[in-house]
Image (cartoon, rainbow, N blue to C red):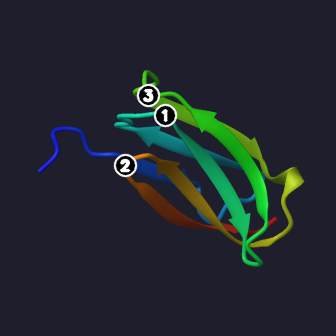
Amino acid sequence: NKAHELVLEVFPNPATDEVNINLHGMQSDGKIMIFDLTGKMVFSQKTEADDSEMIINLNTDQFSNGIYMVRMASEELSLTKRLVIQK
């Protein structure tokens, strides 16, 4: 059992005008990526291990309606959450 659990929260979900990606418990550098259902990466941002908590606020203007996968990947592990955008 790890002392620090990595938590990835995506809200509101479904998102209308904006979406927040909240990440905490990071132990190493990594990357947050958003993919559409064809597997195309539509967003990415690097994360630093010393950002114990990180909140990314995105406007949904850059995304079409649909289902996306929000993925946090670091050396140790990866987490994926499903995101629905309904404008």
- Mark 3 and mark 1: Cα distance apart in space: 5 Å
**Amino acid under label 3?**
Ala
Along the polypeptide, which appears first: circle 2 or circle 1?
A: 1
Q: Circle 1 — which element?
A: loop
**Amino acid under label 1?**
Asp
Residue identifier under label 3: 49
- The mark found on residue 29 in the picture is 1
- Tell me how many marks there are: 3
In the figure, residue 64 lies in which quadrant? Answer: bottom right
Q: Residue lying farthest left?
A: 1
Q: Circle 3 — which element?
A: loop
User: Looking at the image, which residue is at 11% across and 51% down?
Assistant: 1
User: Looking at the image, which residue is at 50% across and 63% down?
Assistant: 80
**In screen coordinates, is 54 left or right of 87?**
left
- The mark found on residue 76 in the picture is 2
Q: Circle 2 — which element?
A: loop
**Amino acid under label 2?**
Glu
In the figure, residue 46 lies in which quadrant? Answer: top right
- Mark 2 and mark 3: Cα distance apart in space: 12 Å
User: Looking at the image, which residue is at 44% across and 57% down?
Assistant: 78
Residue 65, horizontal then vertical, whole percent = 82, 70
User: Looking at the image, which residue is at 77% across and 78% down?
Assistant: 38
| For residue 27, above or below residue 74 | above
Q: Are marks 2 and 1 in contact (CB under 8 Å)?
A: no
Q: Are marks 3 and 1 in contact (CB under 8 Å)?
A: yes
Residue 10, horizontal then vertical, whole percent = 54, 54
**In screen coordinates, is 77 left or right of 16?**
left
Question: Nearest the camera: 16 or 59?
Answer: 59
Question: Nearest the camera: 62 or 80?
Answer: 80
